[in-house]
Amino acid sequence: MEYHNPVLLKETVSGLNIKPDGVYVDVTFGGGGHSREILKHLGSNGKLIAFDQDKDALKNAIDDPRFLMVNQNFRFLKQFLRFHGYRTVDGILGDFGVSSHQFDVAERGFSTRFEADLDMRMNRDSNFSAYTVVNKFEETQLRNVLSNYGELRNAAGMARVIVEARQDQKIKTSEQLKTVLRRFLPAHKENKILAQIYQAIRIEVNQELEALKEFLLQTNEVLKPGGRLSLISYHSLEDRLVKRYIRNGLFEGEPEKDVFGRVEVPFKAVGKFVIPTKEEIKLNNRARSAKLRIAEKL
Ligand SMILES: C[S@@+](CC[C@H](N)C(=O)[O-])C[C@H]1O[C@@H](n2cnc3c(N)ncnc32)[C@H](O)[C@@H]1O
């Protein structure tokens, strides 16, 4: 099975406005689809550094002297770029979320399609998994995860039944979780609600929004003036952070004005946003919720 079919491939890479001798970073290497496309635009003096926190992605590492693979979380972008001798770069590509590979391997626990142990860790060296969230979190923490990250209307009720059920027996598998939550899963909406529950738990397990914020803040320090960000989000929580950061350099509130009423922001948006065509979505269902934003460092 294919590891991952890259989304908005040409659009995302052309957003980087690649200079053949530039230094580029792909912070979500996965199957390396976007990375391979970047390499096509680089000359022999160009450089591509790829991050992925999942060891499974390492098997896709590209055998090319211009390519460097870093098996780390992109929340440590600046630190690992420095470690490898790069203080600034010309462009950064991010294609967030989970790869098709991660979804398709049942034991990773990301997919609602399979019976599997509760896991969902992108970095399997971590000891914080979906099992921890479901079995160890206090009721209010669980409710907040389900409500904030899954936007689930019944978050409070779901948290309550999880906490009650686990007093008798730990909830170890996806099937057990489904059984516990059965009353919240009417047949006609089961898949949709389960997807929201999984999204919520996954975001918590991988600290996805914290990692994204830390990463975005570092892009401002790491990108050269004129350097590009090309970022694909898959849900509104992610996209909101990316959009606000590009517009204001902040995640909340408005930037301060100087005495002349001017604001100083680190980026300028390039175009509005790009979404896949119907044709792309037909060929690759994972593309359906993608939203690409491109920005240039001022
Ligand atoms: C949607 S896939 C990227 C697919 C890739 N663009 C391709 O063409 O094959 C996202 C990848 O980013 C990785 N990832 C997600 N969050 C990460 C983070 N905070 N740090 C490092 N890697 C991360 C995941 O492990 C996954 O392999």
Image (spheres, rainbow, N blue to C red):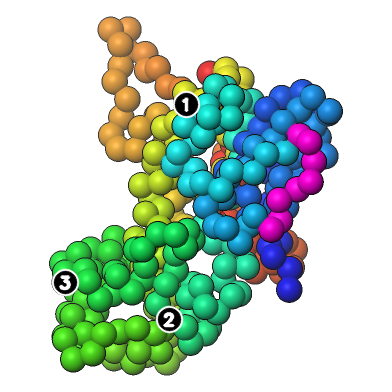
Residue at mark 3: 139
Residues tagged 2 and 3 counted as in contact (Cβ below 8 A): no
Q: Position of residue 104 (x, y in %)?
A: 60, 74
Q: Position of residue 148 (x, y in %)?
A: 29, 60
Q: Position of residue 21 (x, y in %)?
A: 77, 23
Q: N-terminal of the two: label 1 or label 2?
A: 2
Residues tagged 1 and 3 counted as in contact (Cβ below 8 A): no
Whole-number angstrom distance, CA of label 2 to CA of label 3 = 21 Å
In the depicted view, which residue is nearer to us: 131 or 184? 131
Which type of secondary structure does the marked residue at label 1 adopt?
helix
Neighbours of disc 1 within 10 Å: few (<14), some (14-19), many (20+):
many
Q: Main secondary structure of the magenta part?
A: loop
Residue at mark 1: 220
Q: Is residue 36 left or right of residue 93?
A: right
Residue 119 in view, yes or no: yes
Residue 65 falls inside the magenta stretch: yes
State which region is magenta.
59-66
Q: What type is the residue that disc 2 sits on?
A: Asp
Q: Nearer the viewer, mark 2 or mark 3?
A: 2
Q: Is residue 273 left or right of residue 174?
A: right
Neighbours of disc 3 within 10 Å: few (<14), some (14-19), many (20+):
many
In the rendered image, which quarter is residue 294 located in? Answer: top right
Residue at mark 2: 117
Q: What type is the residue that disc 3 sits on?
A: Glu
Residue 12 falls inside the magenta stretch: no
Neighbours of disc 2 within 10 Å: few (<14), some (14-19), many (20+):
some
Q: What type is the residue that disc 1 sits on?
A: Asn
Tell me what residue is drawn at x 56 percent, y 71 percent.
103
Residue placed furthest toward the top: 260
